[in-house]
Image (cartoon, rainbow, N blue to C red):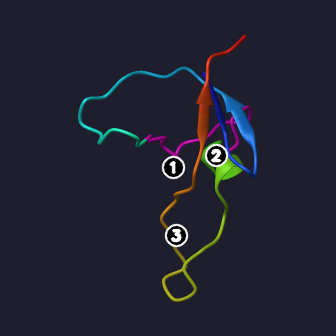
């Protein structure tokens, strides 16, 4: 699938998880490698909480489409 936001786009392998509410998508952003480079940040942002200096909750609108 391709996941696309207004900030970026990724081609990823997806799976259905009945534990998520319909219309929601989950993507881990705490793991990365040289190729992925914390890929969720390509779709959201890298902003830190100003007081705690921890990553803010990541959420944004995305569009899913099948790879062609």
What residue sits right under mark 2 in the picture? 38
Where's residue 14, x and y in %? 49, 22
Q: Residue furthest top?
A: 68
In front of the other: 45 or 48: 45
Task: Say which residue label 3 marks.
Answer: 56
Q: Earlier in the sequence, mark 2 or mark 3?
A: 2
Residue at the spot 40% in from the left edge and 43% down from the top edge: 24
Between tags 3 and 1, which lies in front? 3
- Circle 3 residues within 10 Å: few <14, some 14–19, many ≥20: few
Q: Are marks 2 and 1 in contact (CB under 8 Å)?
A: yes
Determine the secondary structure under disc 2.
loop
The residue wearing badge 1 is 30
Residue depicted at 67% across the width and 61% down the height: 45
Q: Residue at x 65, y 42 (%)?
A: 39
- Which residue appears at 24% of the width and 36% of the height? 19
Position of residue 37 relative to residue 14, above or below, is below
Q: Residues within 10 Å of mark 2 (few under 14, many from 20)?
A: some
Above or below — where is 22 with respect to 68? below
């Amino acid at each position: 699938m391709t996941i696309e936001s207004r900030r970026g786009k990724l081609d990823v392998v997806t799976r259905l998880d009945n534990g998520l509410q319909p219309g929601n998508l989950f993507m881990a952003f705490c793991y990365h490698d040289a190729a992925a480079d914390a890929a969720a940040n390509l779709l959201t942002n890298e902003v830190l909480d100003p007081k705690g200096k921890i990553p803010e909750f990541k959420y944004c609108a995305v569009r899913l489409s099948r790879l062609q």
